[in-house]
Image (tube, grey):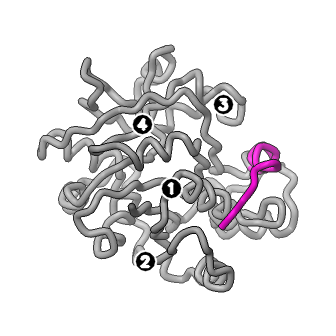
């Protein structure tokens, strides 16, 4: 089964300077906006993401990159991973995550796949649940689980999407970056970290999608459109666990600390 990693973003938040102490190599990666290429313990952050996918049973991985990417292509061509096959797709212009997903359409076709961010480190158990699901699905993270280890602070939760789930466990709505912050302050809030099991039907929802308020074509909005216009049923899989989020320079020390003892096997 394929997994698609979205690694073509500009990394605008990561580029913003602050007082965080970084190594020269980390500062260079931050200045380029290359979240996936952030050096940690002699590796790239993406190494940890790839290893987690292999641990969850994925053997085919597609990495969506920028047109000017040379670092990731050259690195993984030289390493020649043995646990999975890695292919590349190019997002020609930084139009958002839904547009980035379209870049991988020719690789996955109509078959089911899992798509995830390149700047998040997800629990292996959750990735495995998505791979084994028999239908479109997403991980519905609990507020308590996301806040448990303190790497993601409460104020950041409003930057993610909130999931509305019916009594049968299926999504009825996806509210991207909700204006009403109280939606993520409830103890029973179900929060999306933009990791999905989907199939070829999502590509039609990505095409012709209206831009968000940020001017981007957002994958959560494409899922919302598919639910409303195509009748797509997406199962919400409850997940009471944390996710590491490498969005800002200030995230680097905490993410580095939490990954220090994680074994990477490519």
Q: Which residue is nearer to you in this view: 19 or 196? A: 196
Q: CA distance from mark 3 to mark 2?
A: 33 Å
Q: Position of residue 128 (x, y in %)?
A: 48, 46
- Residue that mark 3 sits on: 153
Could you tell which of marks 1 and 3 lies nearer the N-terminus? 1
Q: CA distance from mark 1 to mark 4?
A: 27 Å
Report the mark closest to the observer, 1 or 3.
Answer: 1
SS label for mark 1: loop
Q: Which residue is nearer to you in this view: 131 or 253? A: 131
Could you tell which of marks 1 and 4 lies nearer the N-terminus? 1
Marks counted in the figure total 4
The furthest residue to the top: 187
Residue 177 visible in this rendered orientation of the protein: no
Q: Residues within 10 Å of mark 2 (few under 14, many from 20)?
A: some
Identify whether 88 is placed above or below 250.
below
Q: CA distance from mark 2 to mark 1?
A: 25 Å
Identify whether 264 is placed above or below 177.
below
Residue 161 visible in this rendered orientation of the protein: yes
Could you tell which of marks 3 and 2 lies nearer the N-terminus? 2
- Residue that mark 1 sits on: 57
Identify whether 82 is placed above or below 181.
below
Q: Which residue is nearer to you in this view: 253 or 48? A: 48
Q: Residues within 10 Å of mark 3 (few under 14, many from 20)?
A: few
Q: Which residues are magenta?
A: 252-266
User: Is 179 colored magenta in this rendering?
Assistant: no
Report the mark closest to the observer, 1 or 4.
Answer: 1
- Residue that mark 4 sits on: 161
In the figure, is residue 194 to the left or right of 35?
Answer: left
């Amino acid at each position: 089964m394929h997994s698609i990693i979205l690694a073509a973003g500009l990394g605008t938040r990561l580029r913003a300077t602050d007082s965080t102490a970084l190594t020269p190599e980390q500062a260079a990666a931050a200045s380029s906006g290359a979240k996936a290429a952030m050096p940690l313990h002699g590796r790239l952050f993406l190494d940890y993401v790839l290893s987690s996918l292999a641990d969850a049973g994925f053997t085919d991985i597609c990495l969506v990159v920028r047109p000017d990417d040379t670092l990731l292509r050259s690195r993984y061509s030289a390493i020649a991973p043995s646990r999975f096959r890695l292919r590349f797709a190019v997002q020609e212009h930084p139009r958002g995550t839904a547009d980035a997903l379209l870049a991988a359409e020719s690789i996955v076709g109509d078959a089911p796949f899992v798509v995830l961010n390149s700047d998040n480190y997800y629990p292996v158990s959750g990735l495995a649940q998505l791979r084994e699901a028999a239908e479109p699905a997403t991980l519905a993270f609990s507020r308590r689980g996301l806040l448990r280890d303190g790497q993601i602070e409460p104020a950041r939760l409003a930057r993610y999407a909130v999931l509305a789930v019916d009594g049968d466990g299926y999504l009825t709505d996806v509210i991207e970056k909700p204006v009403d912050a109280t939606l993520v302050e409830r103890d029973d809030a179900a929060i999306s970290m933009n990791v999905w099991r989907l199939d070829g039907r999502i590509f039609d929802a990505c095409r012709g999608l209206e831009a968000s308020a940020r001017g981007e074509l957002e994958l959560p909005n494409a899922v919302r459109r598919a639910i409303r216009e195509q009748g797509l049923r997406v199962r919400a899989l409850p997940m009471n666990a944390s996710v590491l989020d490498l969005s800002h320079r200030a995230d680097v020390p905490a993410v580095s600390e939490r990954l220090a003892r994680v074994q990477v096997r490519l």
